[in-house]
Amino acid sequence: NWTMSAYRQKMIEKIRAQVGRGKVICGLSGGVDSSVAAVLIHEAIGDQLTCIYVDHGLMRLNESEQVVTMFRDQFNIPLVHVDASKQFLGELEGQSDPETKRKIIGRLFIEVFEEEAKKLGGAQFLAQGTLYPDVIESVSFTGGPSVTIKSHHNVGGLPERMNMQLVEPLRELFKDEVRVLGRELGIPDSFIGRHPFPGPGLAIRCPGGITPEKLDILRQADAIYLDEIRKSGQYDKIWQAFAVLLPVQTVGVMGDGRTYEFVCALRAVTSVDGMTADFYQFDMNFLGKTATRIINEVRGINRVVYDVTSKPPGTIEWE
Ligand code: XMP
């Protein structure tokens, strides 16, 4: 794509001009945006960039390992992997309000990040994978009061507090353009084509209180669901697909025994930018097969339902 290769060159020049000989740190989230930003900045200024991956313990099955391996081994980008899962899960214990959970995660994320940045001896620049829709969504609606539907936890407030300047090379791009740029930079398709994943991770896919046991159940169900989606060739037709572990137990029967376990909801939507979305029309046989696999393979779930709500009026996530 010639347009994107020109954009890449333009941004590399711009990053070099902005940063000079300065040091940049970048918070990796495991998502496509921060990854593309990091690889682009690394291409521009090499090891003047250090990435910090704050692992909150709310990632999907094997996800953290995959992220760390890719950046360290494939791209040779200096990367600090901070396992802060105990701290996050500890502070989230007993919290069931969606916005409270987001606030705790956002605050801890900043605290851990700041501490690690200090250990690195400080840096003048903070890199972020902010996209154009993030820029416009944080501006209040025309003619009305500013309404927060969900507080997104990008590291707002951090640059001022740490006296850092922002490097945001993706600010002019939409999601699909970021993917084109990522491919252009040599990031594998399997990574670039990944669905968006929210900063607070599985915490907002476990409505109500979070426990390590629930997260473990959710991880297994989610992995089976995505495995079936990939195998059936539907992954790329979907904007986001994920499992939600409901805080509801229902009665079931397995063998000659009664069970009383959690309900798992499956969600899949199509969308262009995440602002509006339609529920994805799976074939019923696909859903039946996936439900059977989840119930047979995951201890703790005995019922699976499919979410047929579009956005609006629903949101993509359940919290
Ligand atoms: P909703 O649920 O608001 O989601 O329809 C729209 C898009 O945003 C993602 N999302 C988040 N991303 N922090 C994030 O970084 C959050 O707190 C958050 N909440 C929702 C969601 O996955 C979807 O792509």
Image (cartoon, rainbow, N blue to C red):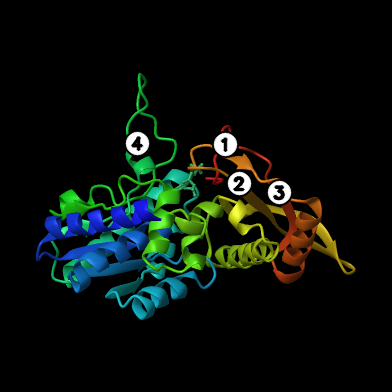
Residue sticking out furthest to the top: 143
The amino acid type of the residue labelled 4 equals Ile
**What residue sits 61% from the left and 58% below the top?**
235
Q: Is residue 74 above or below residue 216?
A: below
Judging by the rendered image, the residue that carries numbered circle 2 is 269
Report the residue marked by disc 3.
306
* Element carrying mark 1: loop
Where is residue 174? Give x, y as percent: 40, 45
Most foreground residue, 130 or 109: 130
Instruction: State which quadrant residue 28 falls in.
Output: bottom left
Mark positioned earlier in the residue sequence (1 or 2):
2
Where does residue 277 sit, x and y in percent of width and height? 57, 39
- Labels 2, 3: front one: 2
Separation of residues labelled 1 and 4 (CA atoms): 18 Å
CA neighbours of label 4 inside 10 A, class few (<14), some (14 to 19), many (20+): few
**Outermost residue, front direction?**
2
Q: Secondary structure at mark 4?
A: helix
Circle 1/circle 2 CB separation < 8 Å: yes
